[in-house]
Amino acid sequence: MLSAEGTMSVHIVALGSECPGGAGSGEEPTAPAQVQGGLLWSYLGHGARELDPTSTTPSRHPLNPAFMEYQSRVFGDVRVMVRDCSSWDLLDSDWASVRSVLEQADIVVIKYSVNDKLAFQQVRNGYAPRLRPLLRHWGMPVILVAVGARLNDEGPPCTCPLCASDWSTCVPHGEGLQLSRDLGATYLELPSLNNFFVGRYFGSVLEYFMIQCLKQKAKERPDKRRGHRFNEPRPPHLDQPARLPPVRVEESSFSQDLQWLLERGVQFADVVFYAGDSGKELGWAHAAVLSAVSPYFKQLLVGRQAWERPMSRCACRERDSPHSLLSTWDGGLDDLTRADGHLPGQLSRLVVKDPLLCACMWETLMFLYRGAWEWEFLEEALAEKLKNPLAVAQLLDRIRSFVGREKSLRDTATPRSQPGPQTLGNIFNSPLYSDVIFMVQGNVLPAHRAVLVARCDVMAAMFSGKYAEARSRVVPIHGVSSDTFLAFLEYLYTDTCCPASVLQAMAVLVCAEMYQVKRLQHLCEVCVCAYLQSMPSRELASTSISVIRLLRRAKCHNADQLYVWLLHFIANNYLIFSHKPDFLELSGELSETICNSGSYNYYK
């Protein structure tokens, strides 16, 4: 429906009073002061104005003085016309005029006070049965709003919807919900008419219905659009009800990456195990990973303080102590020479004195590298190799001492006890066994080459190939902020990504695309979509975040899923984004994309 100025408009009819003891029989049906302090006037805010420019109060309907009329503008140039009546007795006195007003409505808002149970019962028993068939026949959206906090004589007002202490004088939550089901309405409870409940709660629901109403009106008036200029952007729409496409994220490969590090990352290993009886080499490992997973290895390799490096930490005098299982080689630590020209490192030689641990050293290391939580798989692997249940039980007890688990705990993975990828978080941004330092905007970020190589292919090529980074301990990083690169490193160590805002999520997405970490890129896409989808319409219209700019960056950095999602998001919220200054710059690209897609049409 077009208004007199040729703009789109929405007509809202409001019935009932949100104040206790609203207008009743013999009183003035709707007072201007009551309207100006009511729900709809509060929502429209300072933009609400009366129809009569010379009047300082809302004007009355010309055919039905019981309705107060006022209007405002939303979404830029969409006119909202409100006809508000707080007197339910009008339905008995002039039903024909009320029906004519309701018939012109796009949205109906029914209000009542939770502290006026008598008025609510009159509405439920007397007026709701007369409204129900009309509302269902016309098919217009209805919002039932319960306003106020339930009174409690024994203390402050109760805002709990399930509180039953004041049912004698207040309207319970269940009765209001049942009335909304009878009317086919959306039910809301507003403890007060402050900015939060009116703007973000009630306003979000009302704006949703207004947008759906405007879409329906635009679809029903195609002939009136033929006079538009050819190059004017026209709103796209989906053939089916708007449903944003999903953004998919790959399953975590954290355990597989660390398993690869154990199997093939010997180049960056700095711990070697030897059998105590024969001196045979049992395997190589990485001190950073072992220290992060096991407090026992952290104490064995590092000591209480980094500079205290005793020549031997064998504690054979304590039979029950885990220190009796391993000891350092006499002579402590040696430099590990690199034949490929890479930086030399310190090599820790550990002697394994327990025969069971010597026989199953590879299975034990694999268990530790995969997060030290797959106890059932470890028990199966040990049983297959040792063929002795008693020996398996003894070795499991010794491995428990590595990871600091009590014997009474069950060796099964539970959501609370499963550490999973969080194990490397203990060495994230820590100088412990750090062998590389990133310089980002003057900030020092320590890291571990073994972890970086296992988790990022670009890092693996950078530190393994014939590049300057492979021979340098300090690596400068350009084009990325320190906070963004720190969030990128945090993902490599913990397999999680929690950006604090849309802009930070996009910055981490660009960094992930730079280093070709696809899963992190997809996690950032999900974060951007979640942040935007959680914004109510009013916040989208006033936010400083440019969704059009996000769309361009998504296309520039190969975020295909985010690009498609943003196209749908802009199309579904066309009335909001079409008024943005940068929308006209995108109109050609948007038109081409929509024309090439079979799921979109133009309004002719």
Image (cartoon, grey):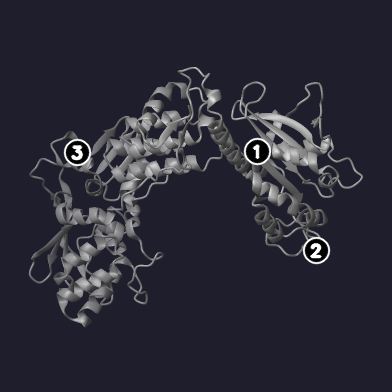
Q: Mark 1, residues whose alpha carbon is within 10 Å: few (<14), some, or many (≥20)?
A: many
Which three-letter amino acid code belongs to the residue tagged 2?
Ser
SS for callout 1: loop
Task: Evaluate whether residue 308 shows in this view.
Answer: no
Residue name at image x 31 percent, y 39 percent: 512
> In this rendering, would 569 be left or right of 412?
right
Which is more toward the observer, 226 or 395?
226
Vertical order, 171 against 141 (above or below): below
Which three-letter amino acid code belongs to the residue tagged 1?
Asp
Residue name at image x 67 percent, y 22 percent: 4
Residue 15 location, x and y as percent?
75, 44
> In this rendering, would 177 be left or right of 589?
right
Residue 604 location, x and y as percent?
48, 26
Which is more toward the observer, 106 or 199?
106
Q: Nearer the viewer, mark 1 or mark 3?
A: 1
Residue identifier under label 3: 462
Residue identifier under label 1: 106
Residue 89 location, x and y as percent?
84, 47
Kindly indicate the quadrant of the structure image that contains residue 243. Answer: top left
Residue name at image x 17 percent, y 52 percent: 269
